[in-house]
Image (tube, rainbow, N blue to C red):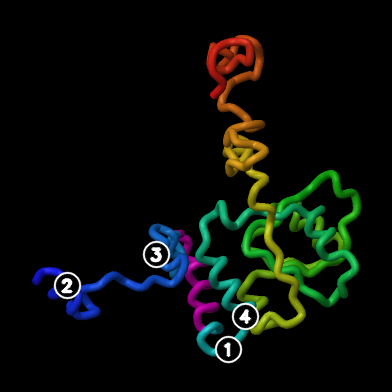
Amino acid sequence: ADRRARATAPPSEMGIDLVAGGRRVGHKARTDTKSPNVYLKLLVKLYRFLERRTDSKFVSVVLKRLFMSRTNRPPLSLSRLAKFMKGKDESKIAVLVGTVTDDPRLLEVPKMTVCALRFTETARARIVKAGGECLTFDQLALRSPKGSGTVLLRGPKKVREVYKHFGHRSTSTSVNTHANVAPYVRSKGRKFEKARGRRKTNGFKV
């Protein structure tokens, strides 16, 4: 009788039919910035308006990136910026939702129009000296509201020092997740973290 009652249970009492990857717990994209910075909040307000009133993918991407944390808005150096803009038309605007930093290894800065959230003092000086222009996002919204004639760029996310200590996925060739990973020790010498679990000649291998 119990089995018959279960079989005739209404659909609402049964399990949820999830789309693949539908139950992603703790991975929700931000819907607003967590920063208390009033200028950033004003930019969010501006690009929310543009997203609502236009069908531009560029505006949607910029708005999404304005919400991001600082680790997800990595800086971009002048040398990388110059490399990405090489061969492109001078009228194109390089857009970075993050900071543009100086690179003293780059001897000659080409003429570029760059829009970013922030410029370091020396980076701004070098761009202006080369005959280029440093724009803010509200200036960009007036000049190119839909993002036409722009090149959207991002800094390298995984160059932070902390990534050297993170393990990788286990594979058939490299089963140990922490193989070739930098340890959190002062030095990799004979005296540091070389007990019996860490020596090939002695005991087990972690």
Q: In this figure, which residue is indicated by the disc labeled 2? A: 6
- In what element is the residue under mark 2? helix
Q: Is residue 47 magenta?
A: yes
Q: Which is more toward the observer, 116 or 12?
A: 12
Q: In this figure, which residue is indicated by the disc labeled 4? A: 57
Q: How many marks?
A: 4
Residue at x 54% of width, y 83% of height:
51
Name above or below for residue 21 compared with residue 178: below
Q: Which residues are magenta?
A: 35-49
Q: In this figure, which residue is indicated by the disc labeled 1? A: 54
Q: Give the CA distance from mark 3 to mark 2.
A: 25 Å
Q: Which is more toward the observer, 51 or 135?
A: 51
Name above or below for residue 194 compared with residue 105: above
- Kindly identify the amino acid type of the residue bearing the numbered disc 2: Arg
Location of residue 87 by image quarter: bottom right
- Kindly identify the amino acid type of the residue bearing the numbered disc 3: Arg
Position of 177 compared to 147: left or right? left
Q: Give the CA distance from mark 2 to mark 4.
A: 48 Å
